[in-house]
Image: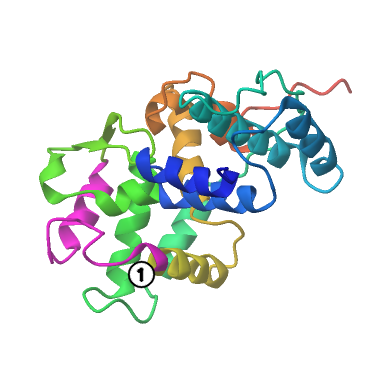
Amino acid sequence: MTPIRDFARRYCLTNGVTHGYARQFDILAKRLPWDMETITTEQIDTYLTQALAKLRPITVHRHRRMILTLVRAAQAKGLAAGCDCKVRRVKYTLPPVRAWSLDEMRQLLAVASQMPGGTRKCPYRILLPAYLQVGFSTGLRRGDLLAIEHADIRGNLIAVTQQKTGKTHVALLNDAALAAIASLPKKGRRVFGDLVSDVQIVRVLRRLVKSAGLCGTGKYLRRSSATYAEMQGFSASRQLGHRSKDMARFYVDEVLLTENRPPLPSLN
């Protein structure tokens, strides 16, 4: 028999799943004492129903998608014959998207330019403003930002192969982002990845946001990029390199999008 956790690990390895998603698969699989040869639709339905009593619907919806991904991969290998994939639906609502406004981004930049400390290769007061500028201008994921190479930059454009999808995406750099990149020391092929590790950037961004008196995580940077791209008439999907055309509902802060709209006239 093949435990679902073992199958999930092999699936992630053979399909080049990113570390973050591989960890999500592993956390989910630990909950499921199933074997891929004998997994059934009823088992999946029962788990989803029980999970809804403890977890948020959007989390259970993600679990449903991940389980079906593993089942279909197993069926391609002749396993999971007892599951027809017609499992119960999970209804969910998305919370309002929250991003950083331009004023908040400027506040972050001001604090970042005074941030003490640094990595062995670059002080934070230089590294963090550049990371914020490039992240906002391009909307790239953290892993893709860290993977950018100097050779990828052609004029004000970056052509990157997205780690999550494996698809090529061309992102646009504004003047501030280009100037910030030029201020960074060159310690290797990669613009950011040879100056700071993934773990380090997550930790120092958390410190930065707290020091600036704001809420949010590094994900807000990507959302802000999508929101202000929409304001300029450029779709969030294209800005972020998504094929799906409806990504605005996941990334665009509707409050920021409408904050400058004049109110309706008073009835008085």
Q: Residue at x 59, y 62 (%)?
A: 214
Task: Find the magenta span and give its range.
Answer: 174-199
In the displayed structure, 18 sits above or below 181; it is above
Left or right of 42 on screen, residue 247: left
Q: Residue at x 59, y 44 (%)?
A: 4
Q: Quadrant of the C terminus?
A: top right
Element on which disc 1 rests: loop
Query: What residue sits right under mark 1 in the picture?
Result: 113
Residue 236 coordinates in the image, percent (x, y): 46, 28
Q: Residue at x 38, y 81 (%)?
A: 116
Count of marks, rendered view:
1
Q: Quadrant of the N terminus?
A: top right
Residue 78 appears anywhere in the view: yes
Colouring: rainbow
Residue 169 coordinates in the image, percent (x, y): 28, 30
In the displayed structure, 149 sits above or below 47; it is below
Question: Is residue 198 one of those drawn in magenta?
Answer: yes
Of residues 238 and 254, the one drawn nearer to the viewer in this rendering: 238
Give the crowd class for mark 1: few <14, some 14-19, many >=20 residues within 10 Å: some
Find the residue positioned furthest to the bottom.
Answer: 117
In the displayed structure, 67 sits above or below 27; it is above
Question: Is residue 22 one of those drawn in magenta?
Answer: no
Residue 255 coordinates in the image, percent (x, y): 65, 36
Find the residue positioned furthest to the front.
Answer: 1
Left or right of 157 on screen, residue 107: right
Left or right of 235 on screen, residue 43: right
In the figure, residue 242 lies in which quadrant? top left
Kind of residue at badge 1: Ser
Residue 100 appears anywhere in the view: no
Residue 32 coordinates in the image, percent (x, y): 69, 46
Q: Residue at x 63, y 39 (%)?
A: 97
